[in-house]
Image (tube, rainbow, N blue to C red):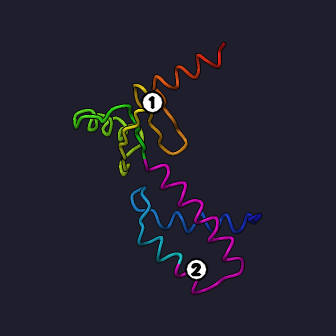
Amino acid sequence: MKISKQARREAKQLFRGCLVNGLLDENRARQTVQAVIARKPRGYFAVLSHFHRLVKLDVARRTAKIESAVPLGLEQQSALQASLGRAYGPGLSVAFKPRPALIGGARVQVGSDVYDGTIRARLEALEQSF
């Protein structure tokens, strides 16, 4: 579905209205959606569709997934959280998941940013070079 420029502008304004100190306020977002649905302005479905996309992108930007070959200790977890917090700002939720298939190292994904320092990725890159 193609969304008009006006619908995009309105969705961005709604999204900015839901931010508190640079972070998305879940209750404000819910209230905004309910208010738009109650009013049903012209093209509201396109506005809500783009608003949903903006919220989804913001949530992904504020979520870090860390996979490692072995479970990380508390010190390592807190050090990683601190360094990611400095890089991506406050309000970052972090999820740790052990994945033995990585062989060694860790893979960090925050939104669309991926930092892959695993042995498996290095072996795959080496394989591609041959």
Q: Amino acid at mark 2?
A: Val
Q: Amino acid at mark 1?
A: Leu
Quarter holding the N terminus is bottom right
Callout 2: SS: helix
Q: Which residue is mark 2?
A: 36
Magenta stretch, overall SS? helix
Q: Is residue 40 in the magenta section?
A: yes
Q: Residue at x 44, y 36 (%)?
A: 108
Label placed on residue 102:
1
Q: Residue at x 39, y 44 (%)?
A: 89
Judged from this view, the residue extending furthest toward the bottom is 38
Q: In terms of depth relative to the viewer, which is nearer, 20 or 59?
A: 59
Residue 91 in percent (x, y) is at 36, 52
State left or right for residue 111 relative to residue 103: right
Q: Is residue 129 in the magenta section?
A: no
Using a 10 Å C-alpha cutoff, classify the residue at mark 1 as few (fewer than 14 neighbours), some (14 to 19) or many (20 or more). Answer: some
Residue 4, above or below 59: below
Residue 25, above or below 36: above
Q: Which stretch appears magenta?
A: 34-63
> In which quadrant of the rendered view does residue 106 lie?
top left
Find the distance from the CA under tag 2 to the CA under tag 1.
46 Å
Total labels drawn: 2
Residue 21 in percent (x, y) is at 39, 58
Q: Could you tell which of marks 2 and 1 lies nearer the N-terminus? A: 2
